[in-house]
Image (tube, rainbow, N blue to C red):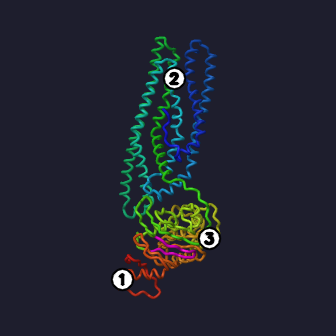
């Protein structure tokens, strides 16, 4: 029985495994020597019964004991070395793929949200766990089974035939284990991913669950999923445990059978007493790897499933080619007739959007809910793929920039903004391990948050907590704005940046947008509140995923007001007071 093949030569996983080939050759050599040393016990007993006892020679016994002790010492040393090499092979295999797996983790929600239940890191851990466990050692031992059976035949054909029958039965048990454990193992894996998703959703929405009395319902869903998961795991465990118990009992029965056959042969003077013991030990040793394989089968099946999932993910998301570094952008942003579909969907939600901006300009994007505003800015910063058309910065389309290079020239404040665990300074500096303090402070000052940070318990060294829990929503949004402005990026895109800001925050936001424009950058702001548009000079109106208007802010707003339904009688608004809500075509006041 040979080790199952769980990859093809063209897959990234198989290529990573191929780099370990020389180490596996060493493991194979160790295994060969070990399996020869495993014969020590059999031949020691053979010599004791056939030479020492008949001759009653104590020196011979002492010599055999010393030789056996040395051989057992070498056996222990090689066994330890083999296990250590297997652990290091698994570690090296994982190390080669760690950065690639992280790329999958961050791309999966954006490129294949339908596969969100798959956890590449957990799959890699599953494969590494199998590679460093007892399974591979047993697979390396399996090819040596014919050697032991052959020696049994040399002792006597009946002893060899008895051991062969036992081996065939164990191989059949192994095949049955594979057939029966496959379905419950797959089901348990899927349910485990579902439980993890429920746990993550509960963690993210704990306030909503408590405030709206949904804890009981989520708890019932969690309990039901857990019950099904445990049932699938129990079924798989029952199968492998049952087959493992059967194989152990069979191996003990086989030892007794070999002893019985040996005794029969001794009675008929066709074998010696030593052959009885040696044959029993050899037959047990021959079948030991098969028994280990059966015991490890559930781990192997889980690793094989993880291997297949990772192969599929890696194939769907190939390595991005290296890009030549382009000059720092300084002049234009052009959106050329782009159409965008959400990740994992073929339905276009944004169609034929086209406009261009020059350095120093600021664009406000307005429109009713679900008009495509956030979709547009996600495609502009390269987060969502563009189905048709191009976004160009200084003439270079986004696909000519690597994400790392483009990110140096882009500041982005998403609608659902989160901060990372760490200090305020680390968050502003985008987790730069050694950020220049002057740039961190400059970004904070540009966002109008420097004084606020100084008022925190430890200033810029204040720990944010997971998700920025140590700050209020408005403070988090202003620190997120400082992060977007860090290192003076050419393009700054802000999606509803004032949703949690007070009047002081609105004024700081306007100054930040004007600061971007004054230094020759381009600012794009998605807004529902008019105060966010104070710092822009152009306006884009979206409705139903299509562009309704684009041009100078005053002109577009004037046309939008004309197109809006006439309001009923309302209290007079004092001269100079800004309207409380933007009106755009197709959007009723709220």
The answer to whether any part of residue 179 appears in the image is yes
Does the CB distance between marks 1 and 3 fall below 8 Å?
Answer: no
Structural distance between the alpha carbons of marks 1 and 2: 97 Å
**Tag on residue 150?**
2
Q: Which residues are magenta?
A: 353-366
Nearer the observer, disc 1 or disc 3? 1
Q: Please tell me which of labels 1 and 3 falls first in the chain.
A: 3
- Give percent across and percent down for residue 464: 54, 64
Residue 290 lies, with reference to residue 493, above or below; the image says above
477 left or right of 62 in image: left
Q: Is residue 361 magenta?
A: yes
Q: Quadrant of residue 183?
A: top left
Question: Could you classify mark 1 by the number of other residues whose Cα lies within 10 Å: few (under 14), some (14-19), or many (20 or more)?
Answer: few
Mark 1 vs mark 2: which is more N-terminal? 2
Residue 125 is situated, as x and y percent measured from the top left of the image, at 51, 47
Residue drawn at x 61%, y 26% as measured from the top left: 71
Residue 19: x percent and y percent? 59, 43
In-front residue for pair 245/551:
551
Which residue is nearer to you in this view: 425 or 366?
366
Mark 3 is surrounded, within 10 Å at the Cα level, by few (under 14), some (14 to 19) or many (20 or more) other residues, namely: many
**Residue 345: x and y, percent?**
41, 60
| Magenta segment, prevailing SS (helix, strand or loop) | strand
Which of disc 3 and disc 2 is earlier in sequence?
Answer: 2
Mark 1 to mark 3 CA distance (whole Å): 46 Å
Dot 1 corresponds to which residue? 567
Q: Relative to residue 95, is residue 568 drawn left or right?
A: left
Check disc 3 and report the residue beneath it: 441
Judge whether residue 84 can be spotted in this image. no
Q: Residues within 10 Å of mark 2 (few under 14, many from 20)?
A: some
């Amino acid at each position: 029985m040979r080790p199952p093949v769980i990859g093809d030569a063209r897959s990234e996983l198989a290529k990573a495994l191929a780099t370990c080939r020389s180490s596996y050759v060493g493991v194979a050599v160790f295994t060969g020597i070990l399996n020869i040393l495993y014969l020590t016990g059999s031949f020691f007993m053979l010599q004791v019964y056939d030479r020492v006892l008949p001759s009653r020679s104590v020196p011979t016994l002492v010599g055999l004991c010393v030789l056996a002790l040395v051989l057992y010492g070498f056996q222990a040393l090689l066994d330890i070395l083999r296990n250590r090499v297997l652990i290091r092979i698994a570690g090296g295999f994982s190390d080669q793929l760690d950065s690639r797996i992280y790329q999958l983790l961050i791309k999966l929600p954006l490129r294949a949200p339908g596969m969100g239940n798959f956890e590449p890191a957990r799959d890699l851990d599953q494969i590494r766990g199998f590679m460093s466990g007892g399974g591979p050692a047993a697979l390396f031992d399996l090819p040596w089974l014919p050697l032991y059976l052959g020696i049994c035949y040399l002792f006597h054909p009946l002893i060899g035939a008895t051991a062969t029958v036992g081996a065939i039965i164990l191989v059949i048990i192994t095949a049955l284990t594979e057939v029966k454990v496959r379905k419950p193992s797959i089901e348990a894996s899927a349910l485990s991913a579902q439980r993890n998703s429920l746990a993550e959703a509960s963690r993210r929405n704990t306030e909503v669950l408590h405030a709206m009395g949904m804890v009981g319902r989520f708890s019932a869903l969690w309990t039901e999923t857990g019950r099904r998961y445990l049932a699938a795991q129990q079924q798989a465990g029952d199968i492998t445990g049952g087959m493992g118990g059967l194989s152990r009992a069979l191996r003990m029965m086989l030892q007794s059978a070999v002893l019985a056959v040996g005794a029969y042969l001794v009675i008929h003077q066709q074998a010696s007493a030593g052959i009885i013991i040696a044959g029993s030990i050899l037959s047990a040793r021959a079948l030991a790897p098969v028994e280990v394989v059966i015991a490890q089968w559930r781990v192997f099946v889980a690793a094989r499933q993880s291997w297949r999932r990772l192969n599929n993910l890696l194939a769907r998301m190939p390595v991005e080619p290296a890009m030549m570094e382009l000059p720092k952008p300084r002049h234009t942003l052009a959106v050329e007739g782009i159409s965008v579909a959400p990740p994992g969907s073929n339905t276009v939600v944004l169609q034929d959007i086209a406009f261009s901006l020059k350095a120093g300009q600021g664009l406000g994007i307005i429109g009713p809910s679900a008009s495509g505003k956030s979709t547009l800015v996600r495609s502009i910063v390269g987060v969502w793929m563009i189905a048709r058309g191009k976004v160009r910065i200084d003439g270079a389309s986004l696909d000519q920039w690597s994400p790392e290079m483009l990110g140096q020239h882009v500041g982005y404040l998403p609608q659902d903004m989160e901060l990372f665990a760490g200090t305020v300074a680390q968050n502003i500096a985008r987790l730069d391990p050694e950020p220049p303090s002057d740039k961190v402070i400059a970004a904070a000052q540009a966002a109008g948050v420097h004084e606020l940070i100084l008022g925190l318990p430890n200033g810029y060294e204040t720990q944010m907590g997971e998700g920025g829990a140590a700050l209020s929503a408005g403070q988090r949004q202003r620190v997120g704005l400082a992060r977007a402005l860090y290192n003076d990026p050419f393009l700054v895109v802000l999606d509803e940046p004032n949703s949690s800001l007070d009047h002081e925050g609105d004024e700081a936001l306007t100054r930040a947008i004007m600061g971007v424009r004054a230094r020759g950058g381009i600012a794009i702001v998605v807004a529902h509140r008019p105060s966010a548009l104070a710092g822009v000079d152009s306006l884009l109106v979206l409705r139903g995923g299509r562009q309704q208007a684009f041009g100078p802010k005053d002109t577009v707003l004037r046309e939008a007001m004309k197109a809006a339904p006439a309001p009923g009688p309302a209290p007079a608004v004092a001269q100079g007071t800004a309207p409380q809500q933007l009106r755009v075509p197709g959007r009723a006041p709220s």
